[in-house]
Amino acid sequence: MEHKKYRNFKESTRHLFRIYTIIPFAVLMILFLVFTIINGRMNLTQKTTEAAQSISQSMAEVYQQYYNEINRMAASPAVTNYVNSHLGSDKVYSEFYDFNNHQKVKSIFHIVSTGGIFLASSAPPEVLSSNFAFSNLINRIHQRPQDTLSEMNSFRYSHDRDTSYTFGKAIIKNGQTLGYIIYQLYESDIQKIIFEQNNEIAMITDQHNTIIATTSNATKGVLNKFSPTFDNQGHVLLNNGKYYMYTKRIPDTPIQVVTLNSYKSEQYTYYTVSVFVLAASVLLWIMIQIMSHKMSTRNSESIDKLIHALAQLREGNFNGYVDIQTNDEFEILGDEYNVMLDRLKDLMEKNKELSELSTIIEVKQLQSQFHPHFMFNVLETLRYAIKIDANQAQDIVMILSRLLRYSIGHDRSVQLQDDMNYVQDYLKLQHIRFNERLEYRISVAEETQEVYVPKLLLQPIIENAIKYGYQHQSKVLIEIRIYTSAGKLILEVHDNGHGMNEETLQQVNQILQSQSNTTKHIGLYNVHRRLVLLYGEQSGIHIDSTQGKGTCVTLTIPYEWGENDV
């Protein structure tokens, strides 16, 4: 048969502590990682969206301001008068600079006649005089004089100043086109608007995805177009990386804002969190090992004390008390073990005493069975009976044989009716011996007949009554009453002997209550101790005696029916 391997309490406690600590920590770490991933994705989406919202709001203000300003200037009397008369340029320039100086995005101002001549300009117009793109711009304004042109186009001026967006409007008076007014917005100022602190790449494009301004030239494709490449998950592939893109079209304008943020920062966050989780796990594992060892050692210390105490008890050491002061169930177990040890010691002492007492009783019984004086008295009585009354002699022989047969039996407990039969035979012999000098009466309650009692329970009491009864008088009366009261079996033996004075009675009672006896009152003491050991302190002998009136010995035992209860 395979031997079952057991894990000791210390190891079990440590094992359970590790499991019940690691499991919630692992669940917490998993939830933390999931939260980090979701939160990282949400943060990436949110900051990309917020950047687009912020840029689009700023660009919407810029667009609307320039749109309103070019329409105002195109209808301004100062501008119309200047185009017709070429007078009042200072007013025109003053109005332009007053507006331009208050703008986030600065611009270049031009007024061009229908013949293509620059009438006014805030920048040297020489670079535009032969510029084919600018000529096409003028032509598009001319074809739609009632509309306000706004489009993406790029022009380079001195000092590497580039413009990237243009507003244009025809100057009309009385239904006749007098010239054209143009505002060209600096690309560098537009780039300042689209730079957001929490955003990586931002750009502004027109409705054809042509880039007006961008924070990264990596977004510029063929013909300055933004043509993103997507993977199967919808991520923009740019610069060998994956980006999340958000597009925001500015209402009532032909332009839109595009913001992009790389997943690399999110991956870096995942890496940082992973390193943190790994470091925290290692640290926690070390702490769990230390804490589990301390906790299991503390808890198992009480178990070790109990096991050591049990080992001492197994070796026969009944003084191996345990001292546990943990204020928990282990302390209760330790206290209960100590109580059990005390009770076991007491029980061992009682068993030892009962065994010794039983031996003494058996020896005394053997002595009484063949007591020389008793046998001599009986035989002497028998000798006279043979001469005088043969029938009585026959009765003596029969009674004596029953007494001897009963007394040499090995039963230690018998039914009360059997023991009372012995008592009656014993008293019959004594009555034959003493004739009318001995009188006895026996009263036994019917319900007590089958109750089990220790064997020869009353003989020492009756023997004492006869022995001491004739010391001061010639006639003795013995009364035996057996009944039940309050769940107890009461056996009373009364005699009308001389009795005892108060001092003698007190000495006898002290002898009965002592743990050992070296006096001559061995019969009463042995009966009393036997009852106390068998049935507890509530049982035993109680003596009432009055000098000159007699003595009453009362035996109290539990009212039990089974032989095993004796």
Image: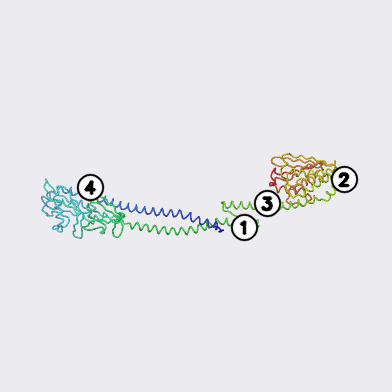
Question: In the rendered structure, which amino acid carries the disc numbered 1?
Answer: Ala
**Dot placed on the residue nearer the N-terminal end, 2 or 1:** 1
Q: Which residue is mark 1?
A: 311
**Dot placed on the residue nearer the N-terminal end, 3 or 4:** 4
Identify the mark at residue 386; answer none if there is no mark.
Answer: 2
Question: Pointer 2: residues within 10 angstroms few (<14), some, or many (20+)?
Answer: some
Which of discs 2 and 3 lies nearer the camera? The answer is 2
Question: In the rendered structure, which amino acid carries the disc numbered 2?
Answer: Ile
Identify the mark at residue 201; answer none if there is no mark.
Answer: none
Left or right of residue 183, residue 328 in this image: right
Q: CA distance from mark 2 to mark 3?
A: 53 Å
Give whichever of 360, 266 is nearer the camera: 360
Q: Which residue is mark 3?
A: 347
Q: CA distance from mark 1 to mark 4?
A: 94 Å
- SS for tag 3? helix
Left or right of residue 372, residue 182 in this image: left
User: Residue 266: image x %, image y %?
Assistant: 35, 56
Which of discs 1 and 4 lies nearer the camera? The answer is 1
**Dot placed on the residue nearer the N-terminal end, 1 or 4:** 4
Which of discs 2 and 1 lies nearer the camera? The answer is 2
Q: Does the CB distance between marks 3 and 4 fall below 8 Å?
A: no
In this orientation, does residue 148 appear? Answer: yes
Q: CA distance from mark 3 to mark 1?
A: 20 Å
Question: Pointer 4: residues within 10 angstroms few (<14), some, or many (20+)?
Answer: few
Q: Which residue is mark 4?
A: 252
Q: CA distance from mark 2 to mark 1?
A: 69 Å
Which of discs 2 and 4 lies nearer the camera? The answer is 2
